[in-house]
Image: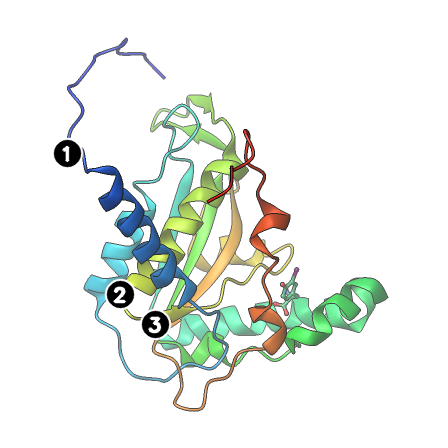
Amino acid sequence: MASEGYVALPLPDRVQVPPEVAVAQAEAFRLSMARRHSVRAFAPDPVPEAVIRAAVATAAGAPSGANRQPWHFACIGDPGLKRAIREGVEEEERAFYGGGAGDPWLAALEPLGTGVEKPHLTTAPWLIVVFAERWGEGPGGERWKNYYVPESVGIACGFLIAAIHQAGLVTLPHTPNPMRFLNDLLGRPEREKPVMICPVGYPAADATVPAAAKRKKPFEAICSLHPAPGPE
Ligand code: IYR
């Protein structure tokens, strides 16, 4: 891949908010994201393609190693393709829940109520399959290295999940293993590895979430401040 060298642009979209506005905005975003829940039961109501396109464009704006953008998002609204994906996923999950996972893993999943059946993969109006591009390839077959691929794609997935939530929709990040059948179904090259399936839609009227999923670690357990905060 040819380098164009370093070209500096003045920071686009510069904002400089007062500290109290920064605190208020951070808190507003925290509260909004705290209202995001992974949902397993979807309503069949349609979702406009424009929402899916906007969410994917948001994800594709994520930072990535050397700006290689090592991702591809396959968006599936076709019912036959969704059914084929569900069948492939459930076949893998049968092996996983039938012993492949091992007892400690199955015990860890029990409070989440997961299982082989994945009806959401056909009920949700859209599935977004996220692929990680392990290396880049030009039209002439020349190859280049991508950097920090899992980290980059993980960040993009976070952006995608936040964008879906911001649109007022729900998803359930799903990561069956090894998922290679998705390359065949979706015509993606071998150098792309499927890493996540995000069903997207409205929640079913009777949707529930596992109580266990709502127990978050105390803030003090996941964050340390240096220097330690003084007395209020
Ligand atoms: N992929 C399986 C199992 C599973 C694994 C983890 I780690 C989860 O947080 C949830 C499920 C499934 O989707 O059922």
- Tell which circle, 1 or 3, labels the residue nearer the N-terminal end: 1
The kind of residue on which mark 3 rests is Asp
Q: Residue 174 occupies which quadrant of the picture?
A: bottom right
The residue that disc 3 covers is 78
Few, some or many C-alpha atoms within 10 Å of disc 3 (few <14, some 14-19, many ≥20)? few
Q: Is residue 110 above or below residue 65?
A: below
Point out the frontmost of discs 1 and 2.
1
- Residue sitting at 34 percent across and 64 percent down? 165
Residue 49 picture location, percent across and down: 22, 66
Where disc 2 sits, the SS reads loop
Q: In this view, does 25 lie above or below 2?
A: below
Residue 4 picture location, percent across and down: 26, 11
Q: Outermost residue, front direction?
A: 231
- Tell which circle, 3 or 2, labels the residue nearer the N-terminal end: 3
Q: In this view, does 154 lie to the left or right of 22?
A: right
Whether residue 104 is visible here, answered yes or no, is: yes
Q: In this view, does 76 lie above or below 110?
A: above
The residue that disc 1 covers is 13
Displayed-image quarter of ligand 1: bottom right
For the residue pair 166 and 126, the one nearer the viewer reads as 166
